[in-house]
């Protein structure tokens, strides 16, 4: 039996999907933590589409993958399973078929699972978003913003009220500012913009414009995420839902550093998949 035939037969019988913690090294499926579960026919149909439609590679990723998708029939009997391998690669019944699928809608799959409560996946969106929007760091340029570069602050659309405070702080040093100074920056921004949703939007816009990966993850991006920490998650989500693509990139960067990145998944999906 070919994989495509097995998928058709298994999904026709499937009445539930459980998303399980771990990959190929996660131990017996019955003993794993259930991260999400659905019995809804509409969601099952969508998950089938997202995990089976794509290019069959005839090969397998060498990583152990995770999380794991497990299919169950009406009697709750296991039909088969798949592991996720990076951005958009799904490996169904690997030991039997050794034929990973590069799915047609990788971003939609990530967001579908995140909206269902599976945490830790939004980081997979960072690379594709950065490339699409053109914020990869230049291979021959400085990795961090240098001291005394007001034009760079302006290009990154750093809130004007903060620029004179940061022009003499290199990007690498911005990540290590003392808590008291970060609080003063947050207070200064709040004084200039009292609306917390607008402040969140300005910070997400700044975060999204930082060159990736060095500055966005380990330099100035650390400072922006610390400033966002002064705001309620609900305001960040609201700003994301009404924001620009760059703000969505900033929101994904922020979410990837939170204990629960699912909080912003619906807002990101609304912007990315519309």
Image (spheres, rainbow, N blue to C red):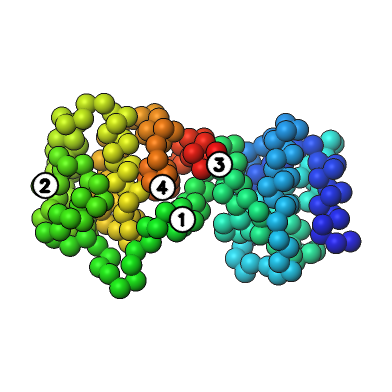
Question: To which residue does mark 4 refer?
Answer: 249
Q: Between residue 192 and residue 79, name the one nearer to us.
A: 192
Helix, strand, or loop for circle 4?
helix
Q: Earlier in the sequence, mark 1 or mark 4?
A: 1
Give coordinates of residue 194: x percent, y percent: 22, 26
Position of 139 relative to 210 (above/below): below
| The label number, if any, that marks residue 132 in the structure image | 1
Mark 4 or 3, closer to the camera: 3
Mark 2 neighbour class, 10 Å CA radius: few under 14, some 14 to 19, many 20 or more: few
Helix, strand, or loop for circle 2?
helix
Q: CA distance from mark 4 to mark 3?
A: 14 Å
Q: Is residue 23 visible?
A: no
Helix, strand, or loop for circle 1?
helix
Q: CA distance from mark 1 to mark 3?
A: 14 Å
Q: Earlier in the sequence, mark 1 or mark 3?
A: 1
Question: To which residue does mark 3 refer?
Answer: 273
Question: To which residue does mark 2 refer?
Answer: 165
Q: CA distance from mark 2 to mark 3?
A: 38 Å
> Which residue sits at x=74%, y=69%?
58
């Amino acid at each position: 039996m070919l994989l495509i035939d097995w998928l058709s037969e298994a999904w026709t019988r499937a009445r539930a999907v459980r998303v399980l913690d771990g990959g190929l090294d996660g131990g017996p499926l019955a003993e794993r933590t259930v991260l999400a579960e659905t019995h809804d026919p509409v969601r099952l149909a969508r998950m089938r589409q997202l995990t089976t439609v794509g290019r069959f590679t005839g090969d397998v990723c060498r990583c152990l993958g995770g999380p794991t998708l497990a299919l169950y029939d009406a009697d709750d009997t296991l039909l088969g399973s798949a592991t996720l391998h990076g951005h958009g690669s799904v490996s169904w019944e690997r030991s039997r078929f050794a034929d990973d699928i590069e799915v047609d809608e990788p971003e939609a799959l990530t967001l579908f699972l995140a909206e269902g409560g599976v945490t830790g996946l939004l980081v997979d969106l960072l690379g594709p978003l950065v490339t699409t929007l053109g914020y990869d760091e230049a291979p021959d340029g400085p990795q961090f913003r240098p001291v005394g570069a007001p034009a760079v602050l302006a290009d990154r659309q750093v809130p004007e009220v903060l620029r004179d405070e940061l022009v003499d702080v290199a990007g690498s040093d911005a990540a290590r500012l003392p808590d008291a100074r970060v609080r003063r920056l947050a207070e200064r921004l709040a004084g200039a913009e009292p609306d917390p949703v607008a402040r969140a939007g300005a910070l997400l816009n700044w975060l999204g414009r930082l060159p990736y990966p060095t500055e966005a993850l380990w330099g100035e991006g650390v400072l922006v995420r610390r400033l966002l920490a002064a705001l309620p998650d609900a305001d960040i989500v609201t700003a994301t839902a009404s924001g620009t693509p760059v703000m969505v990139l900033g929101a994904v960067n922020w979410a990837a550093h939170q204990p629960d990145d699912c909080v912003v998944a619906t807002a990101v999906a609304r912007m990315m998949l519309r």
